[in-house]
Image (cartoon, rainbow, N blue to C red):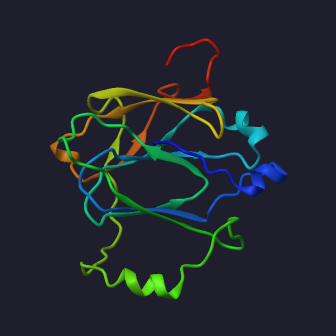
Amino acid sequence: EWWVQIRVAVERHGVNVHPHLSTVTYLTECGAPTLILQCRNSLRPSETAQVYGSLAGGTLSWPKLWKHLAFDGQLLHGTVPKAGDPAGTTRRTFLVNVWLNHRPSNCQRLSKALAKRLGDLPHRFTFSAFQAMPRWSPVSCHAGRFRTRFGRRRLLHEISCRLPHRSGDTTAGTLQLHWASKDAMLGPVEKGKKK
């Protein structure tokens, strides 16, 4: 799933406003991995073409119960649709954006009554020191081609890149992706071209 939120800043002022941090907490161990590209979204929708071109890298993270990712909220990110999950399984995540010096329109503080009803967490968390992610490039192992289109109101942009297939050594893992020139591209959707 790739999405862009519509915010008043974009509608009224032609400015993309990004959270300081975006986070993903996995509530299941199944479903599509999260892809975070080393590509910052433009500050104005009219300047999107400035970020078009070759992508150098990114991060790919498969779901694991209670796993938590935090990253720069201006980086393009989404999920990579994945076939082969057993029937009846659903990818569930809890997404939180951290805003500094800005509050998105129509955003309201959670009422105290509702906050009390949420209760305690069923699991005690422990945090460990950050460990370097394994590095991956298309030449290091078998890769498939991922392609998706996205946009705020219409599918105007396209990402095309090679991604690793999930295997035993990447189960619940997170990989640091590195692409050679033109192995991964962000650009406009070509008119008349089928997906």
Q: Position of residue 186 (x, y in %)?
A: 58, 31
Q: Seen from this angle, which residue lies furthest right? A: 13
Q: Seen from this angle, which residue lies furthest top? A: 192
Residue 140, located in which quarter of the rendered image? top left
Q: Seen from this angle, which residue lies furthest front? A: 113
Is 57 drawn above or below residue 95 in the view shown?
A: above
Q: Position of residue 134 (x, y in %)?
A: 31, 50
6 sits left or right of 181 in the view: right
Q: Nearer the viewer, residue 87 or 4?
A: 87
Q: Residue at x 26, y 31 (%)?
A: 141
Is 125 drawn above or below residue 146 in the view shown?
A: below
Q: Residue at x 45, y 83 (%)?
A: 115
Q: Nearer the viewer, residue 40 or 140?
A: 40
Q: How many marks?
A: 0
64 sits left or right of 46 in the view: left
Q: Could you tell me if residue 36 is visible in this image? A: no
Q: Residue at x 22, y 48 (%)?
A: 89
Q: Could you tell me if residue 81 is visible in this image? A: yes
Residue 99, located in which quarter of the rendered image? bottom right
Is 36 drawn above or below residue 22 in the view shown?
A: above
Q: Position of residue 183 (x, y in %)?
A: 47, 26
Q: Residue at x 62, y 51 (%)?
A: 5
142 sits left or right of 113 in the view: left
Quadrant housing the N terminus: top left
Q: Position of residue 184 (x, y in %)?
A: 49, 30
